[in-house]
Amino acid sequence: MQIDEANISNLKGLWKKYGSKPLSSNSPNGLLANTHWPNRVWFDHTLADTSFENTDWLGAITPLNVFPVWNDSVRNQLDKDYWHCIFEQTAMYKILNDTETPLARPGFQIKEVKSEKEFQQWVAIASDAFGYEIDLSVIEKLAGDSDIKILLGIQNKQAVASGILFKTEGFIGIHQVGVLEAFQGQGIARYFMKSLLDICADWNGEFAVLQASQAGKPLYESLGFKDQFLIRNYQLR
């Protein structure tokens, strides 16, 4: 599998595990939507197979939905219509055989989420870090999935960081990495990411993939991640 395809396949696979169904009975074949947060709408097949000669299906997408697009022809069409890009991400990857072991950080540990209390802590941290409410019931659906690790970063016995690892063959997606606002600027994100990369390598991953926000991209670049392609996330005006 090509690395670009692997990145987006990993992301779409996680959206499916969050809970998805066809957008509507009239929508094109392969157009899926989350049933709850994160409210994404996407094509399960490649967008190169999607015809934009007839765009009636766009009417099935509501203002609550977020439509991520990584195809130039689709972006050009949406930019002409009543849509606006609410945020951009850069797909990135890193070869895991050059992962560096992080330096020791006193009082810091990573714990895999197992209990109800830990799920609640994880959701509270991620919601605070990203500035939107994450649905606890959606994250709890992931419990027990052998391809997923839901992780907490704990500093001096306080849970301060969140992250999800999702493995698809030799590719491991790093998702929802966030640090409580009150603990940002202390180097926790960098140490947490290095620790996550070590976990990915120990999990027999060959590549780590992620989708970086503009704010997070400098950190990932400094850790050796390489750019792949741009993802623009649209909503109806």
Image (cartoon, rainbow, N blue to C red):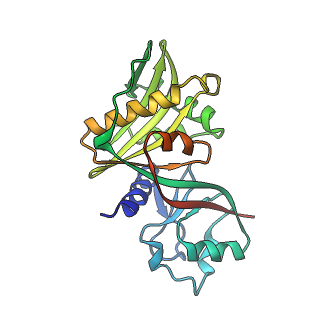
Q: Pick the residue in front: 24 or 91.
A: 91
Q: Pick the residue in front: 192 or 115.
A: 192
> As displayed, is residue 225 above or below residue 186?
below
The count of marks equals 0
Q: Residue at x 60, y 61 (%)?
A: 232
Residue 174, can we see it?
Answer: yes
> As displayed, is residue 214 above or below residue 234?
above
> As displayed, is residue 85 above or below residue 178?
below
Residue positioned most to the bottom: 53
Q: Quadrant of residue 127?
A: top right
Q: Residue at x 44, y 79 (%)?
A: 49
Residue 225: horizontal and vertical position, in percent? Answer: 44, 47
Residue 119, can we see it?
Answer: no
Residue 184: horizontal and vertical position, in percent? Answer: 61, 26
Q: Quadrant of the N terminus?
A: bottom left
Q: Quadrant of residue 193?
A: top left
Left or right of 126 on screen, residue 117: left
Q: Residue at x 71, y 76 (%)?
A: 80
Residue 35: horizontal and vertical position, in percent? Answer: 53, 54
Q: Quadrant of the C terminus?
A: bottom right
Q: Pick the residue in front: 173 or 38.
A: 173
Q: Residue at x 51, y 64 (%)?
A: 42
Left or right of 156 on screen, residue 54: right
Q: Pick the residue in front: 118 or 205.
A: 205
Left or right of 53 on screen, residue 194: left
Residue positioned most to the left: 204
Residue 111: horizontal and vertical position, in percent? Answer: 38, 24
